Image (cartoon, rainbow, N blue to C red):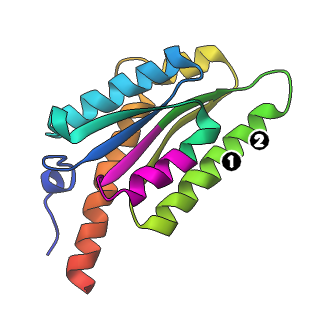
Amino acid sequence: MKQAPRERSSARGLRVALLRAAFNAGVVDGLLSGARAALAEMGAGDGDVEVVDVPGAFELPLAAKAAALSGRFDAVIALGAVIRGGTDHYEHIAREAASGLAAVARETGVPVAFGVLTCATEAQALERSGPGEDNKGAEAARAGVGMVHVLRSLKKSHG
C-alpha cells in the first residue's frame, strides 16, 4: 500500500541530527535555519532535533557515522559549504565530503542527507543558503525525512 504524500513527508516523532560544519559559518547558519524550518513544517518537535557542531566539511562523514551508529537518530542531515578558492583544495574537500557521506548511509542504513554546498563563489553559496524555496538546507532536511519513509516502506513491504 502506498503512503499518502503527507505521511512520506512527516517528521513527527523522528529523531534527526543536524550536523553543522563551522567553516563558512555565515553560509552554513543559513542552511541550518532552512533545515530547522523545513523540519518544523514537517512536524518535528524541538526535542527531536539535535544540532552537532563539526569543524568543517571534511569532518562531516566521521561525525555522520558516529551519529548513525549511535542508534539515537532516524536521519542525519549534513550541512556545510565548500567554496572554490585559488588552489585545488576545494576539489579534495568536496569529493571527500560527498563520497564519505554517501558511504556512511550505505554502510549504516541510516539516511544521511547531503546539505553541503559546493560553490564557485561566496555569492552563489549565500544565494543557496538564504531564506526561501531555494534553501539547500531545507531541501536536505526534506530528503532525509523522505528517505526514512522510503526505507520504512521497503522494510514493511519486503521484510
Disc 2 from disc 1: Cα separation: 6 Å
Vertical placement of 58 versus 69: above or below? above
**Do the residues under discs 2 and 1 have CB atoms within 8 angstroms?**
yes
Mark 1 lies on residue: 96
Q: Dividing the picture into quarters, in which one does residue 85 lie?
A: top right
x, y (%) of residue 75? 34, 52
Using a 10 Å C-alpha cutoff, classify the residue at mark 2 as few (fewer than 14 neighbours), some (14 to 19) or many (20 or more): few
Mark 2 lies on residue: 92
Vertical placement of 78 versus 28: above or below? below
Q: Which residues are magenta?
A: 62-78
Judge left or right: residue 50 versus residue 90: left
For residue 62, which numbered disc appears in the image? Answer: none
x, y (%) of residue 159? 25, 85
SS label for mark 2: helix
In depth, the one of 144 and 121 nearer the eye is 144
Give amino acid for label 2.
Answer: His
Taking the spot 54% from the left edge, 31% from the top edge, the residue there is: 80
Give amino acid for label 1.
Answer: Glu
